[in-house]
Image (tube, helix red, strand yellow):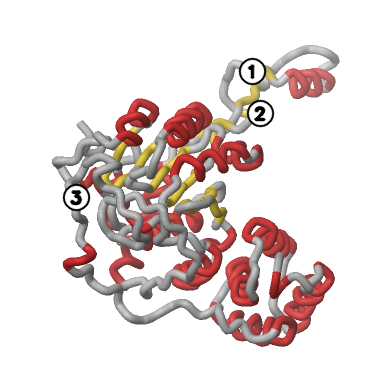
Amino acid sequence: MTDVLVARTREQLFAFLAGLRAEGLRVVAHKQSEFFAGIDALGPSTVGQLYWVGAATLVSAEPERHVYDEVFRRFFGAAADAVVLTDEPAAAPGEDDQPTGMPGESDADAGLDQAGGAGLAAGGVSTEGVKRFAATAPRAHVLMREICRALPGAVPPTRSRRRRPHGRRRRSLDLRAIYLDSRRTHGEITRLHWRDRPPRERRVLVLVDVSGSMKQHSPDYLRFAYAVVATCARAEVFTFGTRLTRVTPLLRAPDVDAALAALAQVVLDADGGTLIGPSMRAFLDNTHYTALARDALVLVLSDGLERGDCTAMVDATRRLALLAHALCWWSPLACDPEYRPVTRGMSAVLGHLDALTGVQDLDTALAAVRGKFLREGGHG
């Protein structure tokens, strides 16, 4: 931690946790681990960012927030920059916000250097600010509940590495159980025992593009990611624009709007430029992150409009496809029946994808989940 938080020692953080327990807030061991993991991963540089890391990992219900706020204020002072949520509805896009190109046009033709444009541009500007998310609408809450119900059947299971006793005949004999059983009958083998690798939940990895060309869709993409984290025990979520950010701990907040407000404090490249290749390469160069992708269901939520040289994007996508159980790409552009992945980046990575699906909001995300993720999109 730097600047404002450079003087906040680890001992003070432990004292803060003790203060929460003294006020009756149940801070169990795994919450403490997530709290410190969130600090290490996100490196909060303001009191507000630290506030939301704690709120996302230590608070399980809204009544606990009052206790948390009071204790946090006592230890760290007022988090003046922590409030970013607004009850105002999201503004409808105006004429200046409409895409200026046609689906599938080349990256070079679509290039805009202005951050925050809503067209098909891959921007190059890195913004350093706090994004404001509109409050989640009631219909969006309904759709998220439907997504949570559909997710368990959509994620393909995997096999546990450990073998366990199984009542039915399998390929693997449980020699230890047979030996122990035979001791009761003086060495006579009267019954065979078997072991099997039972099914377990597969890891789900979600990579969300928060660049300027995705600003109309990234809020719903992040709400979908919140539903994935709430439903799948082995889920991991990263955002990328001009840099990579792990946001899984923040999405474990008890409320989706609180999670988005916390996320807005640490994802400072939102609505900025686009560096898909370098961001994915940063993910693959981290051995811990690479382990998260191995044999996982990987979802990349992006329009795929890379800026500049697409070599890094193509190479990273190929490596990610080799690691993953399945690599699915969700693009808002693919919702258009006329869309064809003719941009340099998307046309080059198409052969490494298991599916390219059109998803632009929670409605289309629910349709994709009910299609078990691998339903083909509009790329033909």
Amino acid tagged 1: Ser
Other residues around mark 1 within 10 Å, as few (<14) / some (14–19) / many (≥20) = some
| Residue 129 place in picture, x, y as percent | 48, 69
Q: Is residue 225 visible?
A: yes
Marks 1 & 2, CB-CB < 8 Å contact: yes
Circle nearer the N terminus (1, 2): 2
Circle nearer the N terminus (3, 1): 3
Q: Given the current orientation, which residue lies at the most extreme left position?
A: 338
- Residue 294 bears which disc, if any? none
Marks 2 & 3, CB-CB < 8 Å contact: no
In this view, 274 is above or below 79: above
In this view, 206 is above or below 16: above
Q: Quadrant of residue 276?
A: top left
Quadrant location of the N terminus in the rendered image: bottom right
Residue denoted by label 1 = 172
Inter-mark Cα distance, 1 to 2:
9 Å
Q: Looking at the image, which is closer to me, 56 or 138?
A: 56
Residue denoted by label 2 = 163
Per the image, label 3 sits on a secondary structure element best described as loop
Amino acid tagged 2: Arg
Amino acid tagged 3: Gly
Circle nearer the N terminus (2, 3): 3
Per the image, label 2 sits on a secondary structure element best described as loop
Other residues around mark 3 within 10 Å, as few (<14) / some (14–19) / many (≥20) = some
Left or right position of 229 against 189: left
Per the image, label 1 sits on a secondary structure element best described as strand
* Residue sitting at x 29%, y 42%: 108
- Residue 101 bears which disc, if any? 3
Q: Looking at the image, which is closer to me, 4 or 10?
A: 4
Q: Given the current orientation, which residue lies at the most extreme top position?
A: 188
| Residue 9 place in picture, x, y as percent | 81, 70
